[in-house]
Image (cartoon, grey):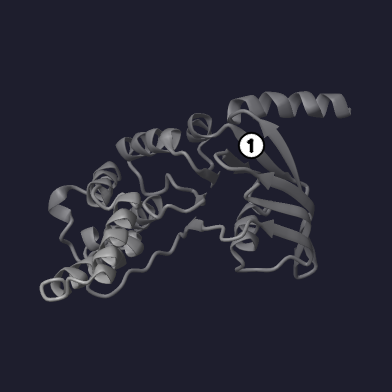
Amino acid sequence: MLFRFGDITKSYGGTEILRGVSFQINPGEKVGLVGRNGAGKTTVFRLLTGAESPDTGEIAKINGLRLGLLDQHVDFAAGETVHTAALSAFKEIHDIEAEMRRLEKQMETDHSAETLDRYADLQIRFEQADGFTYAARAEAILLGLGFAREQWSLDTGILSGGQKNRLGMARLLLSGADVLLLDEPTNHLDVNAVEWLESFLSEYDKAYVVISHDRYFLDRTTDRIIEIENGRAVCYKGNYSKFLVERELRREQQQ
């Protein structure tokens, strides 16, 4: 288990949106979260990230769970370029690399065993974090999401809203989060970028939960569907097309 919703309720202004929602997400699952507009899909994300709290019920998470949220409003640090913004996803690697450079300078005069051991440890950590390939991975994702090489030096302050959202997605996909929370990820993407994202997610080895109105995208990227219906969560195995069939069978059995 990565996280679990246990009998969650949530109301806004006297209107109950979630009424006893229970489900669990496990490592590696590719989940589509569906439901009509206003059903509570985005509320589920906000509860999970801690942006809001449930009225009743419990949200259980494993210790140290790293969530990555695709926000519809993305901000970047002043002076960042497209390229440096993507690379900012690798803060841990940057910190290790900076410490290695500092020790290299120190080792010009300091040859103590303690310093050499510290440097060797950093080298191991750097390699384990894929420090030799992170820049190439970032650049591949930028290209996949439609940023041509000549755009990498652009200041993020002059990007359009759609470009900022694509760059935010690039940073998210590079984050190494245990669970990606993707809210309408195909917005602002052209056909080529959507196809690239489908391919990327099909090979992604960690869990994600995606909200999308694009049924074809859901068909290609999910192996489980959770529908928020009448304030409750109903879980189905399979992609979106299989969910439609299973939901119809379920409704017929309930009549």
Question: Residue 160 location in percent, x, y?
Answer: 29, 61
Where in the figure is residue 213, as x and y percent of width and height?
A: 54, 41
Comparing 61 with 12, the one in front is 61
Q: Image height check: is 141 above or below 220?
A: below
Residue placed under numbered mark 1 in the picture: 225
Name above or below for residue 8 compared with residue 52: above
Res 200 seen here: yes
SS at badge 1: strand
Horizontal side of 235 relative to 71 (left or right) equals right
Query: Observer-nearest residue: 93 or 186?
Result: 93
Where does the image place residue 245, in percent across and percent down from the top left? 68, 23
Quadrant location, the C terminus: top right
Please tell me whether residue 30 is drawn above or below residue 101 in the rendered image.
Answer: above
- Specify the amino acid type for callout 1: Ile
At x 45%, y 47%, the residue is: 185
The structure residue drawn at horizontal position 65% and vertical position 68%, both measured from the top left corner, is 52
Which residue occupies the foreground of this view, 190 or 178? Answer: 178
Query: Residue 174 or 169: which is nearer the viewer?
Result: 174
- Measuring from the top left, give residue 103's x and y in whole percent: 21, 71
- Crowding near the residue tagged with mark 1, few <14, some 14–19, many ≥20 C-alpha atoms within 10 Å: many
Q: Quadrant of residue 112?
A: bottom left
